[in-house]
Image (tube, rainbow, N blue to C red):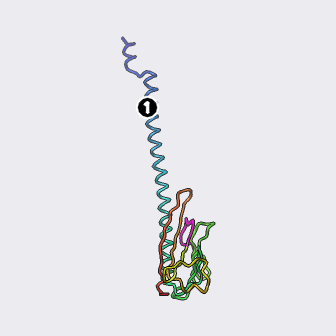
Amino acid sequence: MKRERARKSGFTLVEVVVAVLIFSLVLGATLALYQQGVRSWHREAARVDVQENLRLGLDRMSRELKAAVRLDEASNNAVGFETTDGRLVRYYHMADKEQLMRVVDGGHNPVASYVAALSLTYYDRQGTEIAPPVPEADLNSIRLVRITLTGRKGSEPESTMSTAVRIRTLD
């Protein structure tokens, strides 16, 4: 009688192996979902970082460029101008560090990070595009600047933001 009771109270080896197998499958699926969620979170955080930096760069550039009293430089990836307080400001893209840079009084300061490209397009009063680099004689005819920033963090896809800035003080 003791033998029969002992056989009924435990698990067989097959039952234990099946239980461990099912537990392993459930755990593996759970870990795969968790890993996918973490990857998605990192991708989204990188995208937000890039978009925030691009927005900050566009805001700063456009705010200062709107109030420019004179343009000094107009190329594909750099613009220089004089502000209302007489300071010379220049924005350009530093490709090796992936930054949008601002130069004032000889000091180079980063404005935005994760900037893969800066593209500037210039237009005259009639809306006709002026091909950069704009000769010094034609700088006074520029009334509108389209700024396009492209950003990327690591191996994530690129994001692009663009704005058009009308230079108010030159109208």
Query: Taking 50 as reference, is 77 above or below it?
Result: below
The location of residue 53, given as percent across then percent down, is 50, 67
Membership of 52 in magenta stretch: no
Residue visible at 60% across and 87% down in the picture: 137
Q: Quadrant of residue 104?
A: bottom right
The location of residue 102, given as percent across then percent down, is 57, 76
Residue visible at 48% across and 82% down in the picture: 126
Foreground residue, 41 or 72? 72
Membership of 114 in magenta stretch: yes
Q: Amino acid at mark 1?
A: Ile
Q: Residue furthest top?
A: 1
For the stretch drawn in magenta, the main secondary structure is: strand
The part of the chain drawn in magenta is 109-119
Q: Quadrant of residue 70?
A: bottom right
Q: Residue furthest right?
A: 96
Q: Circle 1 — which element?
A: helix
